[in-house]
Amino acid sequence: MNFIVVGCGRVGAELAYRLFKNGHQVVVVDNDKQSFNRLHPDFRGRTTEGEAISADTLERAGIDKADGIALVTNSDTMNVIVGHTVRTYYPHVKQIIVRNYDPAMRDMLEAFGLQIVSSTAWGAERLQELLIDPSFRAVFSAGNGEVELYEMNIPREWDGRKLSDIMSASGDCVAVALTRAGRAEMPLPESKLVTGDILTVSATLDGVKTLRACLLGK
């Protein structure tokens, strides 16, 4: 597939190299030629110097053949303007991903209806989870971390208890799988828990905190 990465900072350079390593054709765009020095020495994609807001720059980068574009500069305004431009004038580009750098700008970006990745908010959410309780392992993140899938081990204190005993107290939390001896099943409210079971839940951070308190009897 053909991808364009706009912004050759640390995120852009890493993304471009990962896409290249996975066999894709990659063009990196930046208005500062020196930024391309951040690219991995093994990177064999193309680079295009220029302002991404310019139609000429996008055309030189191959926007007419692009399957997707990632806007990952440090300017939220630039990212969303270029993203909106590509969606309007190049409808064949199916994937348009916009990086949100400043969390205060996130609402503005979301108003454009583009796919937003807020690396700052997502990273802060992960750090918060690990600081509060690393025993609840996040295995999947939806959106920018507002809802996640968590895995947790059932402690000895809950051996023989029904799933409904803990889930009824956790409003923003839904059980999606129960794994025992390597075999997963769809859990029912009357499912009995066994020490060592792995319970997978979909939850907000507040929901998983409530569930943790229930498991610990707090």
Image (cartoon, rainbow, N blue to C red):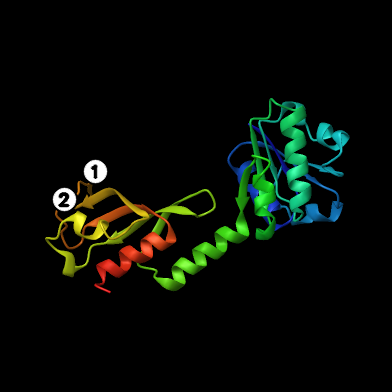
Task: Tell me which residue sits at (64%, 39%) in the image.
Answer: 113
Picture quarter containing residue 55? top right
Q: Mark 1 sits on what residue?
A: 186
**From what the image shows, is residue 33 above or below residue 89?**
below
Task: Tell me which residue sits at (39%, 70%) in the image.
Answer: 133
Disc 2 from disc 1: Cα separation: 9 Å
- Residue 145 or residue 198, whichever sits in front: 145
Question: The C terminus appears in which quarter of the rendering?
Answer: bottom left
Whether residue 177 appears in this view of the structure is yes
Q: Mark 2 sits on what residue?
A: 191
Query: What is the crowding at mark 1: few (fewer than 14 residues within 10 Å), some, or many (at least 20)?
Result: few
Q: Report helix, strand or loop for mark 2.
A: loop
- Tally the marks: 2
Whether residue 6 appears in this view of the structure is no
Q: Which mark is residue 93?
A: none
Q: Report helix, strand or loop for mark 1.
A: loop
What amino acid is found at the position of numbered circle 2 in the picture?
Answer: Ser
Task: Tell me which residue sits at (43%, 72%) in the image.
Answer: 132
**Residue 160, image x and y in percent?**
11, 60
What amino acid is found at the position of numbered circle 1 in the picture?
Answer: Met
Which of pointers 2 and 1 lies earlier in the amino acid sequence? 1
